[in-house]
Amino acid sequence: MLTLGFVYMSMIGLVPSPPPHPQQQKEVVMTAKEKWSELFEWSKNKNLSVMIAFDGQQLLGLVVSVGEDYVELRNQQYGSMVILFEHITAVAGK
């Protein structure tokens, strides 16, 4: 009876699902990095700005360079801003 109750509660969303396997989570981050890299290259080639959200902050700027684990931006206020990929939560452009 207890098992049936647990199954029913998990079906309607009252029981949280287990966290994703670390390997699966890593693959999702890699996919995001690839998509971000496309936007960064677009910004660099077209000389148009992107908005990067990280650690509760947002920065708007033109991509100057992209490394393996960072992106460098510039805007009117700052000549150089370096953001590590591990801190980025979202990128907007195009």
Image (cartoon, rainbow, N blue to C red):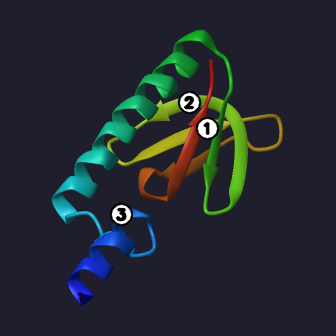
Q: Residues within 10 Å of mark 3 (few under 14, many from 20)?
A: few
- For residue 64, the mark is 2
Q: Which of the 4 quarters of the picture holds residue 48?
A: top right
Picture coordinates of residue 31, whole percent (x, y): 31, 38
For the C terminus, give its image quadrant.
top right
Q: Residues within 10 Å of mark 2 (few under 14, many from 20)?
A: many
- Left or right: where does residue 3 sit relative to residue 94? left
Give the labeled residue for mark 1: 73
3D distance between C-alphas at marks 2 and 1? 5 Å
If you read the primary sequence from the N terminus, does the residue marked by circle 3 or circle 2 appear first?
A: 3
Q: Circle 3 — which element?
A: helix
Picture coordinates of residue 51, whole percent (x, y): 67, 36
The residue type indicated by label 1 comes to Leu
Residue at (43%, 23%) from the top-left corner?
38
Picture coordinates of residue 25, whole percent (x, y): 27, 56
Residue at (53%, 12%) from the top-left corner?
45
Q: How many marks?
A: 3
The residue type indicated by label 3 comes to Met
Q: Which of the 4 quarters of the picture holds residue 91?
A: top right
Do labels 2 and 1 touch, CB within 8 Å? yes
Give the labeled residue for mark 3: 11
* Farthest front residue in view: 1
Q: Which of the 4 quarters of the picture holds residue 10?
A: bottom left
* Farthest right residue in view: 77
For the N terminus, give its image quadrant.
bottom left
Residue at (83%, 42%) from the top-left corner?
77
